[in-house]
Image (cartoon, rainbow, N blue to C red):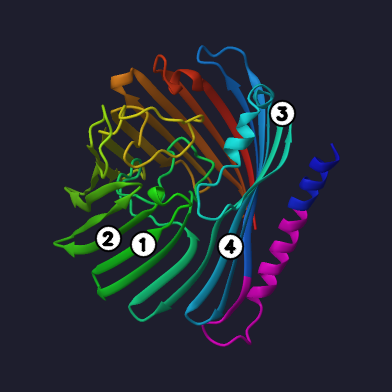
Amino acid sequence: MPHIRFYVLLLFTTAFFGNTFASGAGAITSAPSGINPPTLRGYIREMPAIRLDNDFSNPSFTNLLHNRLNLRWDPAANFRLAIEVRNRLLYNELFRDFPQYSDILGRDEGLVDMSWVWLSDGAWIGHTMADRLYADWRAENWHVRVGRQRINWGINLVSNPNDLFNTYSFFDFDYEERPGSDAIRIQHYPGDLSVIQLAVSPARNSRETVAAGLLNIHVRNYDFQALAGYFRNRLAIGTGWAGSIGGAGFKGEATWFYDLEEENGTDRGNLVAATGLDYMFGSGTFAVVEFLYNGGYGRREGDVFMITEALRPDNIMFSKYAVTLSAKHPFSPVLNGGISLMALPDIDAAFFMPRLDYSLARDLDLEFVGQIFAGGKNTIFEEAGSAFYLTFQYSF
């Protein structure tokens, strides 16, 4: 197919020039202090996979060619412009039976539509999206950023009910950069151990706007935060903390949501809370256990089509309760392994994800990831089945 060959050529050409451009930029020494020429970074990731039904039958082949481009420019000592784009070429025979998948993939919930499905042909979908596009200004104890950006207010490693602007899916391991929001964010640092943030993310439908304030303080070796704001026609009030107990990290966050307008047959308020412990063993193994209470589960019917879609912070999981165990271990300087297990007891479902990653060279990595969804009768878990991915990534 000519358009596919052209896109592959475009990706590798971009990677080549991006690497040359970045290397050349580093050699420029005549720029004034704090002023840097544009830099281009990114990666190309090839990810073939085998997918199976929930009874490990009916295998099918899928493939993803993923390219990311991160362009940044500091035209002044305290000013930055940035744009980050993800380009993906997907192959899956299921696309023939579900042509609406391309519409879902191309959906952009931001104020500005920066998502483009440039190929939808049977089992092939090509998609490009800018998930960062912002101007950033800093001066003394002020920091202002305008545009599509990531506003990360979450604390936990798995579930983040404090993350009003940018929730993400724990099951979407291929998107470590995570989504962005069209927003204005102002940060003020009144002291070395405190931060005040104000952020507004307007929406095309004003009822879907998110606007909130966050206060961070440090007290007796603990970081605390408190937030309050407007979340999609709901009041949101939350808190979170991060500290340690007996050498183990102790984190948690909770947000209470309340409908500003009453809906028949629906409770106006619900709480979402998560807490966990993490510990680094002497062997180098890093382990995490986290507990989630999702009080927003079942409030209203959702429209989630893919299990990798990011859910809202007021209904952050496909169940009311979840327990997650996760561990990572470095077997050698170039080989790392990990395993995650999530149990959702109220829907009788579980999720299992082993992974291994190996550094082939300085900029070339190989990774294996398995995802197994089990149980959850009449839920999206029952439909998800399992998949096994092999990833080759070249970074530039």
Q: Tell me which label, 3 or 1, sits earlier in the chain.
A: 3
Q: Position of residue 9 (x, y in %)?
A: 80, 49
- Mark 4 lies on a secondary structure that is strand
Front position among marks 1 and 4 = 1
Eyeballing the image, is 348 above or below 19?
above
Mark 1–mark 4 Cα distance, whole angstroms, equals: 20 Å
Tell me which residue sits at (21%, 64%) in the image. Answer: 217
Q: Nearer the viewer, residue 32 or 339?
A: 32
To which residue does mark 4 refer?
83
Q: Position of residue 29 (x, y in %)?
A: 63, 84
Say which amino acid is labelled 4: Ile
Q: In the picture provided, is 81 more to the left or to the right than 345?
A: right
Mark 3–mark 2 Cα distance, whole angstroms, equals: 45 Å
Q: Tell me which label, 4 or 2, sits earlier in the chain.
A: 4
- Mark 3 lies on a secondary structure that is loop
Q: Tell me which label, 4 or 3, sits earlier in the chain.
A: 4
Tell me which residue sits at (31%, 27%) in the image. Answer: 298
Q: Is residue 267 magenta-colored? A: no
Mark number, residue 123: 3
- Mark 1 lies on a secondary structure that is strand
Mark number, residue 214: 2
